[in-house]
């Protein structure tokens, strides 16, 4: 059951990350289309600026959970590399606990703005009105998924702390 | 104040003086726009001075202009949450949340005089106090003062004598002025101030809609030699507000000083916007031989008629938000007329 | 608590957390949160910083270009275009000591003409020239240093995100800034090359050479693919990238698109080249996943860095610092030195964009007092600020490289490898300071 859930969550993270990249790819075409429209046909694509700007946050939060899952976030290993295994696991646990707190913080503090933006269907731009509220949803969704990944890594680290050292090896970060 | 670290004792004075620290700012830098410049050079020091003279409180300011704490489209929320105690920023980026405050953008060809534009906005605000207070209360703020832009006109690399002269030309502007450009046959290109010099130079567009002071500051007159007073006009779409928790934590005598100085700020920032525009024209004429012309009323009317009926569009949007849209719009147009402006188009009777 | 004390403690706290191995994003977010909580004595205000900055921290066109530049880099990496560029450069300089290091610098300079973000340069060349140098037995430190150091060119040679931001804040023409960056960029290429030759002459092992049985220093045989192909063949293979360079430069100066839009044009043309070279859906998918990881880590680092810079701004400590310098009554040279020192210090803990955002408005009045030329000062400032992308504990380019290369190298190795290049950057800065025409001559022609 848990395994199934985990499998589902990871697939979801991978999927949204891919979607984020697809959006970057789409922006590329949109901006090039806007340029061509403006230069060759005197018809720019109205709203390109609003779309490009506002999609950036969405892209980041769509991609964040998978990067978190892969452990791509940067950290120094200067002291970590000199610590015994248990010390490393302790730092992993502590670090991912901070991650959990951060993502809970983002979710909690984004909630009211999200609710309000959704209620008034908040938009930006006069000619082309870019809807802002789905961006809030994505920020919260991406944080929740990243929270899940941090939580999983936190549990793994804590479990490793309390297991005898011979077993630790098989339970390192990144093993699937 | 709640947002700024609270009051601390300072026993050095004879009576017990207290210090109030306030963070003020928004998305625009304090050195490039008249409304932020007057906020930094008049509003802040004057509040501090009068509080020092008349009250037991010393006001200390932490400047957060230029997006160092909140960007152009974040200042409203940052002030709502208390990251900023005092909002000195623009309303233009909160298209929907501050639709009410952005009304002037929907009435182009209003007065070209920033003083009249500001007074008109103020008259409307005084006519509908519960509407304005209600709006700002929703965002946990106390509205203090308007700050106008300069007079939106058109700087270009080519001369413009008739509305038809812009046909086929690419014209740049901020998002909010785009609706003024398309109907007349120009290709509107959305762009921010920082890119204009290069874009004019390379020809991404051949003109830009802006007030003269900004054009002078960014030296666009080095490239574009023609300034045409199309008559888009000035708009009081910036200003000062205070976080409501901060406001309620201020002692009554300090609040009174804030209100007093804010009223003076509103006048001064309008006059400054006006005089800076005039000075800028003189500087650009002298430095780069800028040619300033004004469209005739007939040509203005042609341009004006090419624009979709923006006031009616605003009224519909305002009604949807539960505001008395038509009454407010009528009040704004009437206020402009009372202050001496003559509209070339009867927007509301078409 | 005094605001300055809080700011100082937050910096110490950040250092400790990062050194202990806490992820940089978590360290930055935590210290900004605690800092604002202490500054305002209000938990909710501190909390609100997390939400608003996540939502709006990268919501500007200048940030939108970064994913596009990274995507372009991935296309160039996967399609082999960047590799061909590197091979061509290498063909020209391979006889020199540390030749592949120089090739990295030169090809990075060409790449810089299409990219405006150093992280993109770092990402691409971490994939291309780092493995190449390793396979020729170059020492890891030099290989990493050459990639990290030369990625600075990405924002010094136009187009450049930093110049766009500086121009916006200082009301200086972005076009002139772009032109002003060209000669200092070339000077930097020259100094880096000299530096690499010197380093590899003094210690040939750095450049992959070893003593043969006769006691002579020789390189690993470079017979094989690169030698078999003639220079012409190589050059033709790398021609597409020069096409992209011409398209981007011509498009910007011909008025077809803006410097920010150039990121999309660059990405699109590298996409076309990749297709022409046989890249299909699977390759594109691989490009997407390559870029996704880097975009997520880099952009979230920028968001976290913005949280931190906002906390510093709210503490008012930067204003105090600037006014202390302005009111010091010192001579122009001393003040410039102090400003540079302050920028280097901030560079240790902040990202380049945030430093400019915070410091340019504060320094402008000082520059006016001493009558500094804003073009000249801007370029000097941008190079100084760019040192920060290589300095610990927060070095954006170093992090981007680490996230690209993976477990093969440690963050500290990259920082150490970059150190000699920081020293060379200081030389470039001094040259620009003492010979202002290096910066101002070219833009005076347009
Ligand atoms: Na560049
Ligand atoms: Na650094």
Image (cartoon, coloured by chain):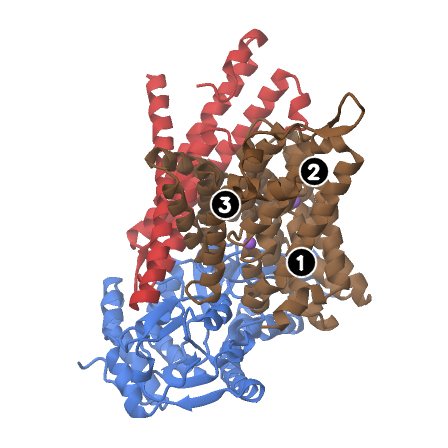
Chain colours: A red, B blue, C brown
Chain bearing tag 3 is: C
At 50% from the left and 71% from the top, the residue drawn is: B197
Q: Quadrant of ligand 2?
A: top right
The response on whether ligand 1 sits within 8 Å of label 3 is: no
Q: Which mark is residue C184?
A: 1
> Mark 1 — on which chain does it sit?
C
* B241 lies above or below C295: below
- Percent position of residue C290, x then y: 45, 36
User: Residue B17: where, in percent of width, then height?
Assistant: 69, 63
* Quadrant (top left, top right, bottom left, bottom right) of the C terminus of chain C: bottom right
Work out whether residue C44 can be spotted. Answer: no
Viewed as shown, does residue C143 lie left or right of A110? right
Horizontal side of C288 relative to C34 (left or right) equals left
Residue drawn 72% across the image and 73% down it: C371
Label whose residue precedes the other's in the sequence (3 or 1):
1
**Is residue B201 at all visible to an observer of this figure?**
yes
Precedes in sequence: disc 1 or disc 2: 2
Locate residue C148: give its quadrant: top right
> x, y percentage for residue B120?
38, 81
Q: Which residue is mark 2?
A: C98
Chain at numbered mark 2: C
């Amino acid at each position: 059951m848990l395994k199934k859930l985990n499998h589902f969550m990871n697939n979801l993270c991978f999927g949204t990350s891919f979607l984020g990249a697809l959006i970057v790819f789409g922006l590329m075409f949109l901006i090039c289309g806007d340029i061509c429209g403006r230069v060759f046909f005197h018809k720019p694509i109205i709203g390109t600026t609003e779309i490009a700007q506002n999609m950036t946050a969405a892209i980041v939060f769509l991609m964040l959970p998978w990067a978190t899952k892969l452990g791509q976030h940067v950290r120094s290993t200067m002291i970590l590399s000199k610590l015994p295994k248990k010390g490393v696991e302790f730092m992993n646990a502590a670090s991912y606990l901070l991650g959990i707190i951060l993502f809970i913080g983002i979710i909690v503090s984004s909630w009211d703005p999200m609710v309000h933006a959704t209620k008034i269907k908040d938009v930006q731009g006069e000619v082309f009105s870019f809807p802002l509220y789905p961006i809030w949803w994505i920020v919260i969704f991406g944080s929740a998924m990243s929270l899940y990944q941090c939580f999983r890594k936190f549990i793994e680290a804590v479990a490793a702390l309390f297991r005898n050292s011979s077993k630790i090896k098989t339970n390192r970060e990144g093993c699937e | 104040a709640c947002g700024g670290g609270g009051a601390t004792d300072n026993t050095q004075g004879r009576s017990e003086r207290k210090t109030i620290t306030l963070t003020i700012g928004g998305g625009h830098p304090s050195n490039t726009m008249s409304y932020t410049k007057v906020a930094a050079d008049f509003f802040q020091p004057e509040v501090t001075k009068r509080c020092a003279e008349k009250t037991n409180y010393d006001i200390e300011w932490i400047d957060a202009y230029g997006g160092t704490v909140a960007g152009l489209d974040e200042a409203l929320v940052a002030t709502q949450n208390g990251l900023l105690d005092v909002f000195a920023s623009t309303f233009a980026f909160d298209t929907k949340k501050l639709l009410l405050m952005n009304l002037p953008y929907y009435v182009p060809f209003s007065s070209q005089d920033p003083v009249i534009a500001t007074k008109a906005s103020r008259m409307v605000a005084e006519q509908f106090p519960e509407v304005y207070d209600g709006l700002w209360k929703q965002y946990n703020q106390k509205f203090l003062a308007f700050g106008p832009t300069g007079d939106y006109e058109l700087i270009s690399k080519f001369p413009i004598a008739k509305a038809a002269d812009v046909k086929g030309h690419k014209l740049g502007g901020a998002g909010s002025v785009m609706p003024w450009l398309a109907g007349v046959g120009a290709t509107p290109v959305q762009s921010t101030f920082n890119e204009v010099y290069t874009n004019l130079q390379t020809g991404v567009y051949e003109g830009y809609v802006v007030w003269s002071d900004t054009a002078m500051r960014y030296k666009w007159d080095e490239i574009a030699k023609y300034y045409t007073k199309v008559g888009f006009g000035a708009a009081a779409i910036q200003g000062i507000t205070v976080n409501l928790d901060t406001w309620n934590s201020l002692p009554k005598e300090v609040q009174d000083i804030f209100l007093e100085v804010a009223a003076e700020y509103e006048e001064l920032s309008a006059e400054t916007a006006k005089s800076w525009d005039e000075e800028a024209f003189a500087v650009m004429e002298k430095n780069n031989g800028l040619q300033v012309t004004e469209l005739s009323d007939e040509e203005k009317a042609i341009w004006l008629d090419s624009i979709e009926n923006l006031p009616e569009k605003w009224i519909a949007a305002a009604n949807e938000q539960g505001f008395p849209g038509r009454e407010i719009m009528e009040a704004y147009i009437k206020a402009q007329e009372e202050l001496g402006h003559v509209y070339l188009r009867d927007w509301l009777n078409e | 608590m005094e605001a300055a004390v809080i700011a100082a403690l937050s910096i110490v706290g950040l250092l400790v957390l990062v050194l202990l191995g806490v992820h940089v994003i978590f360290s930055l977010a935590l210290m900004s949160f605690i800092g604002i909580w202490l500054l305002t004595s209000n938990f909710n205000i501190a909390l609100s910083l997390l939400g608003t900055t996540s939502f709006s921290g990268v919501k500007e066109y200048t940030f939108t270009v970064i994913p596009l530049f990274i995507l372009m880099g991935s296309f160039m990496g996967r399609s082999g275009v960047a590799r061909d560029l590197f091979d061509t450069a290498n063909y020209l300089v391979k006889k020199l000591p540390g030749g592949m290091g120089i090739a990295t610098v030169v090809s990075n300079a060409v790449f810089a003409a299409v990219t405006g973000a150093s992280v993109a340069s770092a990402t691409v060349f971490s994939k291309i020239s780092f493995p190449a140098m390793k396979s020729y037995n170059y020492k890891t430190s030099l290989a990493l240093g050459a990639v990290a150091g030369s990625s600075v060119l990405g924002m010094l040679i136009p187009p450049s995100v930093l110049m766009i931001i500086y121009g916006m804040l200082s009301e200086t023409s972005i076009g002139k800034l772009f032109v002003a960056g060209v000669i200092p960029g070339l000077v930097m290429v020259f100094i880096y090359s000299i530096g690499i030759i010197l380093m590899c002459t003094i210690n040939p092992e750095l450049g992959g050479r070893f003593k043969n049985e006769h006691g002579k220093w020789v390189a690993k045989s470079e017979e094989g693919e690169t030698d078999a192909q003639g220079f012409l063949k190589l050059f033709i293979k790398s021609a597409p990238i020069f096409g992209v360079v011409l398209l981007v430069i011509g498009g910007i100066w011909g008025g077809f698109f803006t410097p920010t839009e150039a990121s999309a044009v660059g990405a699109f043309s590298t996409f076309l080249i990749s297709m022409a070279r046989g890249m299909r859906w699977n390759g594109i998918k691989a490009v997407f996943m390559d870029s996704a990881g880097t975009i997520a880590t880099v952009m979230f680092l920028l968001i976290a860095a913005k949280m931190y810079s906002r906390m510093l701004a709210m503490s008012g400590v930067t204003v105090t610092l600037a006014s202390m310098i302005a009111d010091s009554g010192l001579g122009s040279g001393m003040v410039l030195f102090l400003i540079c020192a302050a920028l280097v210090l901030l560079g240790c803990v902040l990202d380049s964009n945030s430093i400019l955002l915070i410091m340019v408005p504060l320094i402008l009045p000082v520059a006016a007092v001493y009558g500094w030329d804003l073009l000249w000062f801007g370029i000097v400032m941008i190079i100084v600020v760019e040192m920060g992308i290589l300095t610990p504990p927060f070095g954006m380019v170093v992090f981007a490289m680490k996230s690209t290369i993976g477990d093969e190298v440690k963050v500290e190795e990259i920082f150490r490898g970059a150190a000699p290049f920081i020293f060379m950057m200081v030389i470039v800065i001094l040259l620009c300071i003492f010979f202002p025409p290096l910066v101002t001559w070219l833009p005076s022609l347009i």
